[in-house]
Amino acid sequence: MYLKGENISFGYRKDDLILNNVDISLGSGEVLGLVGDSGSGKSTLCKILAGYEKNYQGTVSIDGKKMPSNAYNPVQLIFQHPEKAVNPRWKMKDILNEGHVVSQDVLSSFGIKTSWLERWPNELSGGELQRFALARALSPETKFLIADEITTMVDAITQVQIWESILDIAEKLNIGILVVSHEKNLLKKVCHEVICLSRINNAGLYNELAFRDMQNASLGGMVPE
Amino acid sequence: MSTAFPMNNKGLLRPLNLRQRTILLIILMSLLVITILTSSLYMDSELLSTNFGSKNLAPSLEHPFGTDWMGRDMLARTLAGLGLSIMVGIFASTISTLISVFLGLFSSMGKTADSIVSWLVDLFLSIPHLLLIILVSIGLGGGATGVIIGVGLTHWAGLTRVVRAEIKQIKTQDYIHISRNFGKSYVWVARKHILPHLIPKFMLGTILIFPHAILHEASVTFLGFGLSPHEPAIGIILSESMKYLSAGYWWLALFPGLSLLIVVLAVDILGENLGKLMDPKKAHE
């Protein structure tokens, strides 16, 4: 099963394209990294692939079929800011089970305590909320997960724990993952392949040199090896 | 880790928190409103009739608010007037809220609908309330109906603007997109995600329109364009008492005016406290 984006172009103005004829393909069970400097359209591409952004040119399809519009979307998107992804007037148990009933295995895999289910969103930390967001998105109906900078707000140890759980569940359910991140170590660890999105090259194959340059440029050359 | 925390304020004198203060205020307000309404509805008409044997009496134990130049008991007139004002306020703010619910939801349907609603809001906000109320009231032949419709038709603009902005803001939230991505329908999302956010706004809006409505009713009546002079409205009482103020009959205006002020202030404070309690970010203050 393949999630394919073909000839995707998008711009907020007609003469100012952010994405220009981008092709991207993600297979089941594959873990694909996506890098690119700030403003290169990573998050926009994620939104287009997940069906959040509709005003684009090109096609997004799963095995040649168009995305369903009023049914469960097999492409689920997780954001950088989990506190925006939950309704502040809902209790965590209702938020968790909005799409489908999340199994106890998934909950314990993400280290979600039963007592958290009775809490309100403002009574949990960003990292805790992100686990909820992941647990509710990783259902058996989900075929592809798009992770847009999902572990930027947590410490290194939690990051490892969260990613181990994601990879574990994704392997069981044969879910393909698109990982957007700036962290080289994370990408090296989890991805089978990394592509770079830049305004000049658009989506091309991962180029070690380009990636290093980008990392050095964005972090002022202070990337630990 | 438990630290022994010295609790100095114990017992009845301990300061109440916002929730407790609001509940206390709601109880007191309900008592006040119920008292005023029942007393004005079931008032003995004898009390409002003229009695020239006891005219122009200063406040005393028998007539706590004094009597007027026709010997009518001012307490009875004030209560009847307040009852009338509260009825007008309730009807007018309900009409206003219904209009803003309709227009607010209508504005979320599309860009054209949104421009129409914004245009209407701007239009109504640009005309002075009082002028419009007087026009509508005269157009409908005056009386209670005219005032209620006049006040109701002029007070929806602010709330509509709030509701429109609120819906716009909620619609951009990620959890709305996520809900749609889980295959939920527009109606489901509107019912489960958007409406629960709006109901407190509507309740609060109604409560905050209420004092405005009462004050506008009183001022229109005071100017002679509102309720008919036969009815014991606060506006009528105040405008009539103006003629007698120079004669030293201060109680004719003071007590009715003061009681109107108390009702209006109480409702306003109630609305503000409820607003704070319903705002998840301020509720814990």
Image (spheres, rainbow, N blue to C red):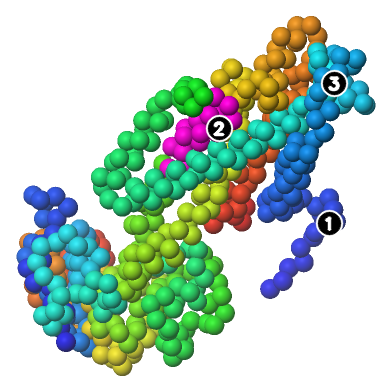
Residue B264: x and y in percent read 66, 34
Query: Dot 3: within a 10 Å radius of its alpha carbon, few (fewer than 14), some, or many (20 or more) residues?
Result: many
Quadrant in which the C terminus of chain A appears = bottom left
Mark 1 = which residue?
A: B10
Label 1 crowd bin: few (<14), some (14–19), many (20+), radius 10 Å: few
Q: Marks 2 and 3: CB-CB under 8 Å?
A: no
Question: Is B75 situated left or right of A71 in this image?
Answer: right
* Amino acid type at mark 3: Gly
For marks 2 and 3, give the CA distance. 31 Å
Q: Residue furthest top?
A: B247
Of tags 2 and 1, which is closer to the observer?
Answer: 2
Q: Please indicate whether residue B282 sits to the left or right of residue B55 in the image.
A: left
Whether labels 2 and 1 belong to a single chain: the reply is: yes
Residue placed under numbered mark 2 in the picture = B145
State which region is magenta: B142-160
Dominant secondary structure (helix, strand or loop) of the stretch shown in magenta: helix
Q: Which residue is mark 3?
A: B66
Q: Amino acid at mark 1?
A: Lys
Residue shown at 39%/67% (left/top)?
A: B188
Spot occupied by residue B92 in the image (x, y as percentages of width and height): 55, 37
Q: Which quarter of the figure has residue B116?
A: top left
Is B29 above or below relative to A30?
above
